[in-house]
Image (spheres, grey):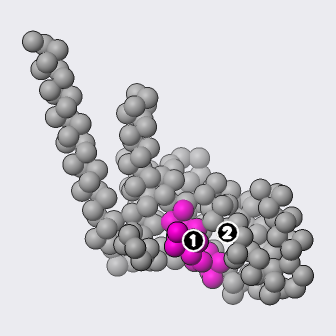
Amino acid sequence: LREGINVIMNKADSDESRYQTILASDAIHAYAANGNLTFLKILLELLPEPSKQSSLVLNHLDQLRLTPLMVFAGKGRLGGGSLEYAESLIGFGADKNVVQSRTGLSALGYFRQGRRLKKRIEVIFGLRESYSMEVARMEGVLTPDQGPTKADEAVLVAEKDEIELEEEEEEGLEDWSES
């Protein structure tokens, strides 16, 4: 990660060039994906006009048309400072109201998808942990001002359908093993 910052600094020969290099590198997205607040702050401080350009960089769309907040949220992380990281991104200028044009998901929807994937992994490896309070707090931070999008809500519906199907399968296995 430090190497990435050095590359950006070496490529940029002017303030405008540094700003454009930071945008083109998707470094902000990479640091967001890793949840690395220290390097994210350093990168934001390298902007020629951090107070004006931070929100532009933090809302820049990558090749998948995702913002850094969406990338971070999509990891579905909880604990280890994740809530504080999301709050920091928003505090630095990330907009939780941005909606991905193709999927209709906001950062909230990507978080829900990420949690759904993590739950599957927990089930596979028998790591059933309860994060309900943390999930609710993270969802509160990521929920767009106008509320969840229809696509964000659809992620919850799909998750509930999966849970019901898994419960039915478990009941069927129990019935089968008893006979």
Of the two numbered discs 1 and 2 on the same chain, state the one appearing first in sequence.
2
> Does residue 143 appear in the picture of this structure?
no
Marker count (numbered):
2
- Element type at marker 1? loop
Quadrant assignment for the N terminus: bottom right
- Element type at marker 2? loop
Horizontal and vertical percent for residue 33?
A: 60, 57
Q: Are marks 1 and 2 in contact (CB under 8 Å)?
A: yes
| 42 in relation to 160, above or below | below
What residue span does the magenta drawing correspond to? 55-71
Q: Nearer the viewer, mark 1 or mark 2?
A: 1
- Residue depicted at 28% across the width and 71% down the height: 150
Label 1 neighbourhood size at 10 Å, few (<14), some (14-19), many (20+)?
few
Is residue 38 part of the magenta span, yes or no? no
Q: CA distance from mark 1 to mark 2?
A: 9 Å
Residue at image mark 1: 63
The quarter of the picture where residue 143 lies is bottom left
Residue at image mark 2: 26
Horizontal and vertical percent for residue 47?
A: 77, 79
Looking at the rendered structure, the kind of residue marked 2 is Asp
